[in-house]
Image (cartoon, grey):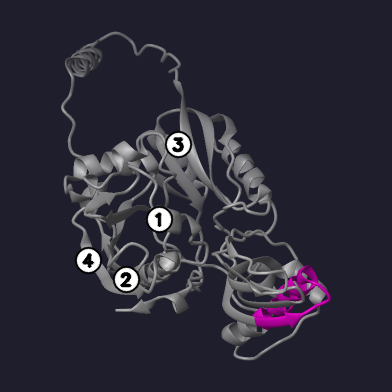
Amino acid sequence: MQVSRFSATVGLVGALALAGVTGMGLAQGSGAGAGAVAVDASGSFEVSGVQVDVKGKDAESARQGGWRLAQRKGWEMLSQRLTGRKSMLPDGTLDALSAGIVVEREQIGPDRYIAKLGVLFDRARAGAILGVSTQVTRSPPMLLVPLEFSGGVGRVFERETAWVRAWNRFRSGGSTIDYVRLGGTGPDALLVNAGQTLRRGRNWWRTVLDQYGASDVLVAEVQLRREYPGGPVVGVFAANHGPDRKPITSFALRVDNADALDALLDAGIQRIDAAYQQALAGGLLRADALLATRPPRVKTEAEKQAEAEAAATAAAAATATSAIPTPLPTSVSTASYTLQIETPNVSALNASESAVRGVPGVRSAATTSLALGGVSVMRVSYDGSIAGLRAALEARGWQVQEGAGVLRIRRGGPAAAPTPQSAPGNSSAATGG
């Protein structure tokens, strides 16, 4: 059983008293150490709200027993949800299927463990055992802008906010929305800020979206209203789409104290993601056609002169009475382009590199930025223009989206109906308003 989680310890009162520990776990199979904050983009099946109450000879034994019991209960809940009937598996099989444990709330005593947990199961393996489809039809890549208003000031990446941290905790692998989430480093704070969300000009938005390989923009907004320091907090949430900020949904949630702010934001993200998925299924989340339209470009003097020379040469060749000359071999210039490829694992990365190298005209292809479970970057040398490379990739069955000197590709093919998986949220700590 592999566990990677992030938790904030509230306190330990006495040697024999129960310790209250609250936190939001971010689990992702293996690879992240204890305390690491990671984003799960694997699309694992998730079961939340599993209650356990286990006794053991010591605190660690009780906790391990609680996690193992959570795996059993979680598998029963997952099989009931997907197939309509409960099923059971040996603990060894569940250990291989489990991708992580999410700690929603826990209390640890000297020989007792009480907790509310979530369990992540590997989508491919669990789907094969249960006999259900594991494919998810996703939207075009959408640039996410997490806009927070607190104290009357709007912020995105100008400084770190609780809203940005909450979106980093959100596991979007099971969602039908392909979120493009930014790290907030480098030029992000200049290109994507609170002022940018008020601009409707498509030219500037097109430049920003091309920078990050996205097709459209989603603005997730929250206004935090505090009655007094440390007291109740009200979050007014709004989900908007496109440069015009078309409203998708809005609602309000409230918690009794500031310590539950993370639970409030996590519950808000869960409802916003559900609203975006519903809008996508209803055809309301279509990409703005003006963002895909390229305005005509004014030709430079050098281009006009080159066209005039080409026209004069063609006219001279047409009127020539001499014999047809032997055609000279035409030279094709070689250029380098950037490809963004989804690489869920090492096998997919190796297969993608081999497939790209096999495209006619490609001289070399090398991965320059590796992101297993995310989007890797590959540098390709190609004999021709970027339009020719796009056509060659599409001819080989790839789905291609073109940006400014960048192509984002993914394998094509029919996909089954979506199986959206909601992200964990401490909704018990927040009430709708």
Marks 2 and 4, how far apart at CA: 11 Å
For residue 418, side relative to residue 127 (left or right): left
For residue 312, side relative to residue 343 (left or right): left
- Residue holding disc 3: 389
- Residue holding disc 1: 162
- Residue holding disc 2: 279
Q: In x, y percent, where is residue 256?
A: 38, 74
Local packing at callout 2 (Cα closer than 10 Å; few below 14, some 14-19, many 20+) is some
Marks 3 and 1, how far apart at CA: 42 Å
Q: In which quarter of the image is the C terminus?
A: bottom left
Q: Cβ–Cβ below 8 Å for labels 2 and 1?
A: no
Q: Which of 179 and 185 is in front in this view?
A: 185
Q: Which of 331 and 351 is in front in this view?
A: 351
Upstream in the sequence, badge 1 or badge 4?
1
Q: State the SS at label 4.
A: strand
Q: Cβ–Cβ below 8 Å for labels 1 and 4?
A: no
Q: What stretch is highlighted in magenta?
A: 52-75
Q: Which of marks 2 and 1 is in front?
A: 1
Local packing at callout 1 (Cα closer than 10 Å; few below 14, some 14-19, many 20+) is few
Q: Could you say which quadrant of the image residue 265 lies in?
A: bottom left
Which kind of residue does numbered mark 4 sit on?
Pro
